[in-house]
Image (cartoon, coloured by chain):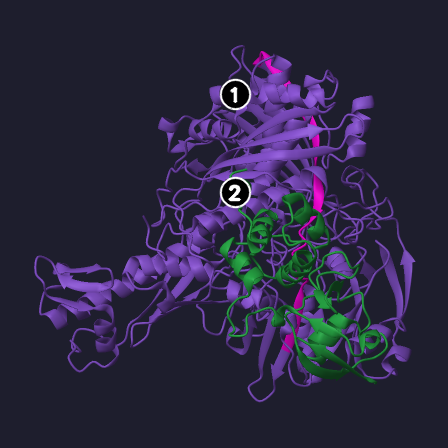
């Protein structure tokens, strides 16, 4: 099996991968980074979203072998340098934007991608952007609040809906 | 104001830190040394006779360790059913065998035929394709009514028919109910479907079996809501492994909603195969597999009648329901359309006579069992749709008709005609609160605003009741449960004062690690951060029954309170010794023991240290140590209730419905963590609105599942549900558990579907489409548009 190298969360890493090995499997089984979750097999649920060269990618839709040399950020790379929760992560905790936690890594990574391209999204923009991330626990309202708060916006209007 | 981390505080969840950093430990994150992988070859036909299985080629393939078929499980039992329903005639239900791997016949698409264990998952999957299975296809039984017709093909050859049971409740009331209908001034009837759903927790099921030959002991890691139940069912009934040789661990579990209560074939398979192969065996479900192997939910067809007198008082209710069991009986399937459904048919109302008839039917579909709400959404949907229809037919206000027939606040405790006794409630209060939050007084203005934009606005109401906190063991035993429904807790106080709590409840999103710590912190008066909550491992937790039916705080929390009180009682005796006072004079406040009326005191850690370093200690009267276990068996169900209001806008050009606002005014009794309660209601609402507008599990007449992926089964997404307004300020505490709590996990999913449908019918009637009296869920644009054109 060929060896595939990537820079993951700022560190060079490598593992073997078959041609058919998905990026999600490469991260989880090859590199032991189990924070990226797999919730479906039709690239619908978004639990596996990671950043590849800065763009949000569903890791279950990409072959690891195609991404040799890529820079990948996973949920494990989202905390602050001192280990404390990063801005988006902290907002998800503050606004109870997660329950079982399974979809959460994908939600946080999609949020990171959204805020990188649109630092002050409206509620509608947040909801539209997160269409590709399914959460079965929260009903999304607190996720939307968390994203708005992470972008530095007032969430009281949302809360009082 | 509550302390930051005591009862009533919106304490932030401690479990979030690991989930938000990718450090959760879900079952699929567990990889054991030497682990092999299993792939199940599943039936792609709904019904057929297996004439041959040839796995020679598969077994010769790279990495394949063994191919298992039913022949390998001759010594094993079938998957047991945990509830036996007795029919109208006093006879037990028909109970077919549910083998681990199909024996002779396949009975639904997804029924496992063979299992390949290999070095890698890919090898197992590749080899499964090389297994040659010949199946003589039989006619599939899909429609419930047709399944009961004379001469229908039988799902199980050894049963007399496809009828699991024909249940009547209360059977003795049947004639009186019919007489009431003969005398009624008005009779209102409705035929409806409660659509089939798939629970779809985002984490697919996973099982990892491990075997230690030196100790002849087994460990199963599994995505379960109740690891002790799995240990009991699998150990005692399927694999014949005694409890002390079987450990079941359910670590972080990514949602359940009922679908992870049951004991599944894959759990037994991995446990057994690990012993046969002397290697850990892992199975991870794909989503496609989940759709054809996780138990489904709901799937009822009902005709319901309401008799009213000339003054519009409810006189009687009569129902006839067909409930789909699927091809086999899942663990608690028989109890859902019966005891969790029929007992709630009184709703919030003073209907004196009720008769519920349920025919449970076997079909060639995936087994159907509890899904969030379980039986209670079915009851609520029937009642709240029917009352709305009645109000429309009688020309009265649906709110006034409900209020007129409500059980009033001064009538509790209230004995319903369907066996249960409601302890507390105040339905007018929740109705008032909801209407206020909905700004219902100005609704007509908003209708005009919508009209000006070419849209139809509607407002729908539902008032629900549910029975939670299941359940008194002696009662459910009489009703056919083959288990008790208590909960356990151990509170282990450590020498320096920190506290380890072991609970039989299981958290798969509910936040127990935070709320349960809040309860203990409040009781003892110590920092919640000095308390750790452990769950999910049968090796360190007393026998517990797990989490479902909104029972964790009401039953599991009560066990924790009970064990903590035992700890406090003993600690007071130790403090009395240290302070040279009588135990009855010792007061515990803010983590400090003091002698009443004096300034003599010792703090919590002084007492705990004395318990474990008993140098100055009443050893002749008291054992050292500070650790207590309690089991709590509830004396009644709890009865959360609430008023739900749904405001929608309907596009008459397309039939598309948008939920603009959804107001939930719930009475959950006392509340420990309002933030978590609000989150639970949000999630329930999304699932209920999903059922009403989007979700539908569909089989064709050949028994092929048409909605077997997220491309076909419409899960609610972020832009589908919005505008939730959640209130829980109406509080009538539960009278029979120590915290006065009722449970909040399922309410949202129970109360919301009828509110949504009522809102749609309201919008259509306001716009003159008065011929539309009902639309079956989900109210997709196509269905709404078709109903408008009919």
Q: Main secondary structure of the magenta part?
A: strand
- Which one is in front in this view, the residue at disc 1 or the one at disc 2? 2
**Between B767 and B342, the one nearer to me in the picture:** B767
Q: Colour of chain A?
A: green
Residue B288 at what x, y percent from top left?
78, 59
User: Mark 2: few, some, or many residues within 10 Å (few <14, many ≥20)?
Assistant: some
Considering the image in quadrants, where does the N terminus of chain A appear?
bottom right
| Mark 2, secondary structure of its residue | helix
Q: Is residue B85 visible?
A: no
Residue B414 vertical position relative to residue A67 in the rendered view, above or below:
above
- SS category of the residue bearing label 1: helix
Q: Nearer the viewer, residue B790 or B22?
A: B22
| Quarter of the image that includes the C terminus of chain A | top right
Badge 2: chain ID: A
User: On what subunit does the disc labeled 1 rest?
Assistant: B
Q: CA distance from mark 1 to mark 2?
A: 22 Å
Instruction: Tell me the residue at 71%/32% (across/down).
Output: B657
Identity of the residue drawn at 20% across and 80% down: B614
Q: Is residue A4 above or below residue B439?
A: below
The residue labelled by disc 1 is B441
Residue B562 location, quadrant = bottom left
Image coords of residue B83 (percent x, y):
58, 52
- Chain B is which colour? purple
Residues in magenta, as a range:
B183-209
Q: Where is A121 relative to B615, above or below?
A: above
- Residue A73 on the magenta span: no
Q: Which residue is mark 2?
A: A159
Q: Does the stretch in magenta take in B193?
A: yes
């Amino acid at each position: 099996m060929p060896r595939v190298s990537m820079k993951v969360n700022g560190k060079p890493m490598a593992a073997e991968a078959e041609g058919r090995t998905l990026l999600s499997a490469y991260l989880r089984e090859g590199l032991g980074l189990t924070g990226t979750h797999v919730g479906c097999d039709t690239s619908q649920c978004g639990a596996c979203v990671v950043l590849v060269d800065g763009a949000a990618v569903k890791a279950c839709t990409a072959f690891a072998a195609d991404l040799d040399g890529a820079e990948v950020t996973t949920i494990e790379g989202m905390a602050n340098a001192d280990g404390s929760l990063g801005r988006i992560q902290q907002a998800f905790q503050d606004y109870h934007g997660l329950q079982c936690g399974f979809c959460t890594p994908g939600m946080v990574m999609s949020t990171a991608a959204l805020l990188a391209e649109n630092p002050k999204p409206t509620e509608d923009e947040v909801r539209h952007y997160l269409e590709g991330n399914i959460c079965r626990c929260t009903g999304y309202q607190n996720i939307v609040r968390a994203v708005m708060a992470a972008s530095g916006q007032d969430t009281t209007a949302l809360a009082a809906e | 104001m509550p302390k930051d981390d005591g009862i009533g505080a919106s304490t932030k969840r401690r479990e979030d830190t690991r989930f938000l950093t990718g450090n959760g430990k879900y079952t699929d994150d567990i990889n054991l040394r030497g682990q092999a992988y299993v792939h199940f070859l599943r039936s792609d036909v709904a019904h057929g006779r297996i004439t041959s299985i040839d796995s020679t080629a598969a077994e010769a393939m790279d990495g394949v360790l063994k191919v298992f078929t039913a022949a390998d499980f001759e010594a094993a039992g079938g998957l047991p059913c945990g509830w036996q329903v007795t029919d109208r005639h006093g006879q037990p239900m028909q109970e077919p065998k549910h083998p681990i791997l199909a024996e002779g016949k396949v009975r639904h698409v997804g029924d496992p035929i063979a299992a390949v264990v290999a070095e890698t998952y890919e090898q197992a999957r590749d080899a499964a394709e090389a297994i040659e299975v010949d199946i003589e296809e039989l006619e599939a039984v899909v429609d419930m009514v047709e399944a009961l017709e004379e001469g229908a093909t039988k799902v199980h050859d050894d049963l007399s028919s496809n009828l699991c049971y024909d249940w009547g409740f209360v059977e003795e009331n049947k004639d009186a109910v019919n007489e009431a209908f003969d005398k009624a001034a008005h009779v209102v009837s409705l035929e409806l479907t409660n659509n089939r759903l798939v629970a779809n927790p985002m984490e697919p099921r996973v099982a990892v079996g491990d075997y230690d030959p030196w100790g002849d002991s087994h460990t199963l890691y599994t995505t379960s809501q109740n690891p002790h139940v799995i240990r009991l069912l699998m150990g005692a009934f399927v694999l014949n492994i005694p409890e002390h040789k079987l450990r079941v661990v359910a670590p972080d579990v990514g949602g359940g909603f009922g679908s992870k209560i049951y004991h599944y074939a894959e759990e037994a398979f991995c446990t057994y195969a690990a012993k046969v192969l002397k290697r850990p065996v892992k199975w991870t479900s794909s989503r496609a597999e989940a759709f054809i192997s996780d138990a489904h939910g709901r799937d009822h067809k009902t005709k319901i009648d309401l008799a009213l007198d000339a003054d519009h008082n409810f006189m009687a209710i009569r129902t006839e329901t067909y409930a789909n069991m699927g091809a086999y009986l899942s663990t608690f399937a028989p109890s859902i359309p019966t005891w969790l459904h029929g007992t709630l048919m009184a709703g919030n109302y003073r209907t004196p006579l009720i008769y519920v008839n349920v025919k449970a039917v076997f079909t060639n579909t995936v087994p159907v069992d509890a899904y969030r709400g379980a039986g209670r959404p079915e009851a609520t949907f029937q009642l709240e749709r029917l009352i709305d229809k009645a109000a429309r037919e009688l020309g009265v206000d649906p709110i006034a008709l409900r209020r007129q027939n409500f059980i009033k606040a001064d009538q509790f405790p209230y004995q319903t005609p369907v066996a249960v006794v409601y302890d507390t409630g105040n339905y007018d209060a929740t109705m008032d609160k909801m209407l206020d939050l909905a700004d219902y007084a100005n609704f007509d203005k908003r209708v005009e605003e919508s009209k000006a934009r070419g849209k139809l606005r509607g407002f729908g109401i539902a008032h629900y009741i549910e029975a939670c906190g299941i359940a008194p063991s002696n009662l459910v035993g009489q009703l056919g449960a083959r288990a008790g429904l208590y909960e356990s807790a151990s509170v282990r106080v450590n020498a320096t004062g920190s506290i380890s709590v072991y609970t039989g409840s299981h958290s798969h999103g509910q936040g127990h690690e935070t709320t349960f710590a809040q309860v203990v912190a409040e009781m003892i008066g110590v920092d919640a951060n000095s308390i750790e909550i452990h769950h999910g491992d049968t090796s360190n937790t007393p026998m517990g029954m797990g989490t479902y039916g909104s029972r964790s705080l009401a039953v599991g929390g009560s066990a924790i309170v009970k064990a903590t009180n035992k700890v406090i009682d003993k600690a007071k005796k130790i403090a009395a010794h240290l302070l040279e006072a009588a135990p009855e004079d010792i007061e515990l406040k803010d983590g400090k023991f003091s002698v009443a009326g004096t300034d003599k005191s010792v703090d919590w850690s002084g007492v705990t240290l004395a318990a474990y370093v008993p140098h100055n200690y009443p050893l002749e009267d008291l054992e050292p140590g500070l650790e207590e276990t309690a089991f709590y068996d509830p004396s009644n169900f709890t009865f959360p209730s609430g008023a739900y209001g749904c405001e929608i806008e309907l596009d008459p050009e397309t039939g598309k419905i948008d939920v603009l606002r959804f107001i939930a005014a719930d009475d959950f009794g006392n509340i420990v963590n309002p933030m978590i309660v609000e989150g639970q209601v949000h999630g329930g609402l999304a699932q209920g609105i999903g059922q009403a507008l989007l979700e539908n599990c569909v089989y064709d007449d050949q028994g092929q599942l048409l909605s077997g992926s997220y491309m076909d089964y419409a899960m609610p997404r972020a832009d589908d549900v919005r505008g939730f307004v959640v209130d829980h300020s109406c509080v009538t505490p539960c009278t029979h558990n120590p915290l006065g709590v009722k449970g909040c996990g399922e309410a949202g999913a129970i109360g919301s579907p009828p509110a949504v449908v009522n809102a749609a019918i309201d919008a259509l009637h306001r716009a003159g489409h008065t011929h539309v009296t009902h639309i079956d869920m989900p109210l997709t644009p196509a269905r709404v548009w078709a109903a408008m054109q009919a």
